[in-house]
Structure formats: structure tokens, C-alpha cells
Image (tube, rainbow, N blue to C red):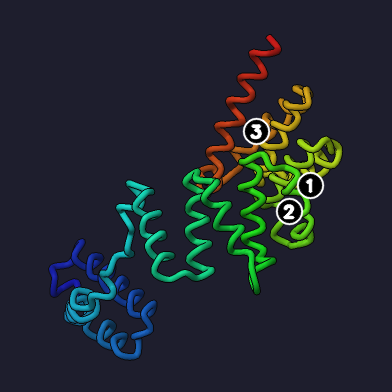
Amino acid sequence: MSMLFGGGSYYYLILILEAFCIIHCLRRGTQQKWLWMLIVLPVVGCFIYIYSEILTNRSTLRMPKVDVGAVLNPGVKLKRLEDELRFTDTFANKIKLADAYLEAGFTDKAVDLYQTSLTGAFAENEHVLAQLIVAYSEQARYQEIIPIAKKLYKLPQFPRSKAHIGYAIALENTGQVDLAEAEFKAMKGRYSYFGPRYEYGMFLVRQGRDEDAYQIFTDILNEVPQLSAMERKASKVWFGKAKDELKRLSAKSA
């Protein structure tokens, strides 16, 4: 092989090309068809393989569909979901639109859809009830949150959810401060759960316990260097909020 191509770097280029083709065919499960040719005829076999399995196989080149319009203009997504619900009035379509409304800040519209969807077989739907807690929290309807939260409290997904944060805030705003703090403490954890921990810090600020809050925010930021790049990116917003609160508390105590 090196003699055919004059040796040198060509030899390594062929090895790289052959390795690429072999790995590709193994991943696609076509090794029985191609492996012998790639090994016995590495140069010719690779060119034939690339032409047959990559260049002429459109499925390998298909890019995932991205709704560019929805990314640039959230109203496009809402309009599409509204049309879908208008044409097919199902529980699933209603909840997809309600979730989109809530995410976009149209809380009243989201609540209307959630409430009307809680009928029949879906009267106790866990996702809808959890989303209602989040929406009611934004509307400051704290009294209505507590009975809903009690229905979800023992579910395994509840302890670190947005609904749990909403429940803790509802307890705080209905005069049950000690119970609220117990719920916030239950959401703590090192190197994780930065959203609930930030909310716990804010709870402490509202209770006039600035030193305790300062420690919460400091702990959050001290853990950042130990996280992976993906973990840092996922919780970036909470790190920024914690940093802002530390600055504010420092200025307040100066």
C-alpha cells in the first residue's frame, strides 16, 4: 500500500480513511456487507463505500428539522399550536398550548387551559396539577396552591420540581414560614439543584436573614469550578443571579 502511493503521509491518510469507513459501517450494522472489502481492498473499497453508503444515501445526510421561525419569533409557535388545537381539540394539544403559553408569559391563558383540561380521566393529571402550581405562584394565588401540592407531594419527581418551589413560596406567603423553610431545606444539595437553592437564599433575604442568605449564594458560586462545562451552562442563570445578590448584600452591609 505504501509502495503504491509512494509512502509517507499517504499511507496514514489511507489508514484514517479506512478506519472511518469501518467505524461507520459498524455503527450502521452493515459490516457483513462491506467489512471484507474495506479490509482486502482498502483504497477502492473505501471509495465504493463512501459513494454507496454516504454520498448516495440521503438518510445519512439528513439534518434534524429545526423550527427556525419558532426560535426567532415565539409567536409563530403559539399560532401553530393554537391552530392545532382549533382543528383537533384533544387533551394533548390543549396541554401543549398551555405549556407554551406559560413559558411565553401568558399565564392567564395557560391557567384557563389547564383548568378546563382537568375533567374526566384527566381530572387528576399530575403534569397539569404541577403546572397549575407554577402558574398560580406567578399569579400570587397561594391559598389555591397548597391543596394541589398535597396531592403531588409523595410523587418521586416532586421534591426538586418547580412545583415544589411554588409550594414552599405558598407556605411562606400564607404565614407558614417554618414549614416553608423546611421545604426549601429539603431541596438543598451540593453541586446541584442551584435553582431551588437560590430560591432558598431569596427566602432568607425576605426573612431578614442576610448572613444566612449570603452563605447560600457563596456556596453556590464556590461550587462552580468543580462542575463540568455542560453543568455550568445548564445553571448559568442561577450563578448570575447568585452573584448579583451577593453584590447587593455586600453593598447593603457596607
- Label of residue 186 in the image: 1
* Amino acid carrying mark 3 in the image: Asn
Instruction: Give the Cα distance between marks 3 and 2.
Output: 24 Å
Q: How many marks?
A: 3
| Left or right of 89 on screen, residue 51 | left
Q: Residue at x 66, y 56 (%)?
A: 130
Picture quarter with the C terminus = top right
| Left or right of 5 on screen, residue 92 | right
Q: Position of residue 45 (x, y in %)?
A: 21, 82
Pointer 3 residue: 222
The furthest residue to the top: 254
Q: Closer to the N terminus: mark 3 or mark 2?
A: 2
Compared to residue 3, the image places residue 94 above or below, namely: above
10 or 175: which is nearer to us?
175
Q: Nearer the viewer, mark 1 or mark 3?
A: 1
Q: Would residue 3 be seen by someone viewing this image from the given angle?
A: yes
- State yes or no: discs 2 and 1 in contact (Cβ < 8 Å): yes
Instruction: Give the Cα distance between marks 1 and 3.
Output: 21 Å
Picture quarter with the N terminus = bottom left
147 or 197: which is nearer to us?
147
Image quadrant of residue 220? top right
* Amino acid carrying mark 2 in the image: Pro
Q: Would residue 43 be seen by someone viewing this image from the given angle?
A: no
Instruction: Give the Cα distance between marks 2 and 1.
Output: 7 Å
Q: Position of residue 246 (x, y in %)?
A: 64, 23
Give the SS element for disc 2: loop
